[in-house]
Amino acid sequence: MGKKITVIGAGIVGITTACYLRRDGHEVTVVTAHPPGEYCSFGNAGMLNPAGCTPQAMPGILWKVPGYLADPLGPLTVRWSYLPRAAPWLLRFVASATLRRAAQNADALRTLIRPSQECYEDLARHAGCPDLIRRSGYLVAYESERSYRDDALAWKMRRERGVVTEEFDAAGIRRLVPQLAPNYVRGVLVPGQGFVANPERLVKALAAQFQKDGGGIVQRQVLGVEVDGNGARILATDAGRLPVETLVVCAGVHSGELTARLGEPVVIEAERGYHVTYSDPGLEIPMPVHVSEAKVFVTPMEMGVRIAGQAEFAGIYAEPNYRRADVLERHMRRMFPRVNTADGTRWMGRRPSMPDSLPVLGASAKHRNVYYNFGHGHMGLCGGAPSGRLIAEIVSGRKPSIDLTPYRVNRF
Ligand SMILES: Cc1cc2nc3c(=O)[nH]c(=O)nc-3n(C[C@H](O)[C@H](O)[C@H](O)COP(=O)(O)OP(=O)(O)OC[C@H]3O[C@@H](n4cnc5c(N)ncnc54)[C@H](O)[C@@H]3O)c2cc1C
């Protein structure tokens, strides 16, 4: 018999989790503060790239941080007044940046996100939007041999985990993406990797299909969780109390606020990123392009071309600093000198990031009726559907198809 399940959150993670739970015959209700796909999952770069399995905390990263911070076009910013509050996260990030831990985290990330493309092709077909899931491969471009060499360890770790790559020189890069500026000397193509042509539409289409399949979505903000000896019992919301029988927390960057109320605090940070989307860029870009030095992705989408990137540590609630989006625009002009930037729209989103780049995924360590699926950081689109499928496996009483130990809530 199906269970009565409440999922908090209607980003890509909550909605894919709800879809898989509904497939298993459960009675599923999503409770969300924002309409489906209108928080962090709205504006990502769209990449479904299981090749991106190396964690952010890599050996040597600390030596790069001062350079990133000093460079006005750099990929990282910290609001200094926020630094003391980010310290617990940063300390764990530093501790994760050893070769041994990075290799373990890459194993766990790769195992989790490997089936991403297949999961989305299946869900999108069922939701009538298979056109959104593309498989073009993507290009990583380097402006100098030195920056290519700086990434050698990451590429080695990816290849050791089954990622297939093809190398290109400057002429080869121009054959792949003719409109890219000629200043790129090294390219690595990751064939067969995919992207989503409109991340917001994908979440909305999956949410609509979930409702057609009998699932419920209610728009309310969860303010608290009441627990007793048997686990979570009541959600206190801005529109009254909701009883719960089984609870899955997929609240993105706000998940830490909820786990604290469940007595299981986690160290999660808002790694704020930005995008600019050009509806009439005047470009033909055959595949997403990542420039490693700038840490930006340029993705061809159905609404135009999007450049996305930046990691800003300023907390969840600080106002966006759109100068970071201006930085993206400067990178866009450098990459594609002929781009028409007249109608760019800017956006900021909060990546729900854990210090080791792994999500919190699996059963609560305290409450028998509570499960977690959040903290996917830079890889939340890619990891959303595969992790949702795993939650359905364990909630339905099946053996999970991968070992969930690396993602446990109390690992720090
Ligand atoms: C610039 C940028 C580029 C990115 N590019 C990529 C990429 O190319 N590929 C990739 O895989 N990932 C990418 N990401 C990361 C990815 O977008 C996120 O990891 C992902 O969207 C997180 O999804 P989520 O469902 O966990 O959270 P969200 O989309 O943030 O959804 C959280 C949901 O929880 C709800 N919620 C929160 N608190 C409460 C509450 N108290 N009560 C009720 N509801 C609540 C919200 O309303 C919302 O519906 C990028 C991120 C950024 C910022």
Image (cartoon, rainbow, N blue to C red):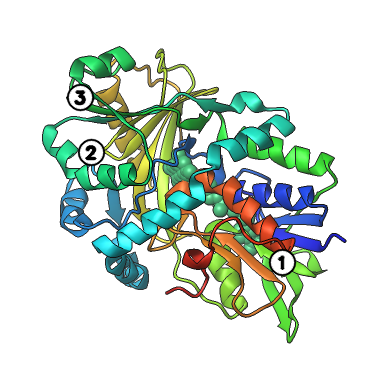
Which residue lies under the disc numbered 1? 247
Answer left or right for 229 relative to 384. right
Seen at 47% across and 51% down, the residue is 111
Residue 401 x, y percent position in the rendering? 60, 55
Whether 183 is drawn above or below 329: the answer is above
Label 3 to label 2: alpha-carbon separation = 11 Å
- Quarter placement of the N terminus: bottom right
Seen at 38% across and 62% down, the residue is 356
Residue 178 x, y percent position in the rendering? 30, 12
Which residue lies under the disc numbered 3? 184
Whether 269 is drawn above or below 39: the answer is below
Which residue lies under the disc numbered 2? 293
Front residue (pair 288, 53): 53
Which structural element holds mark 2?
loop
Compare marks 3 and 2 and give the one earlier in the sequence. Answer: 3
Is disc 2's CB within 8 Å of ligand 1? no
Whether 150 is drawn above or below 97: the answer is above
Residue 45 x, y percent position in the rendering? 45, 36
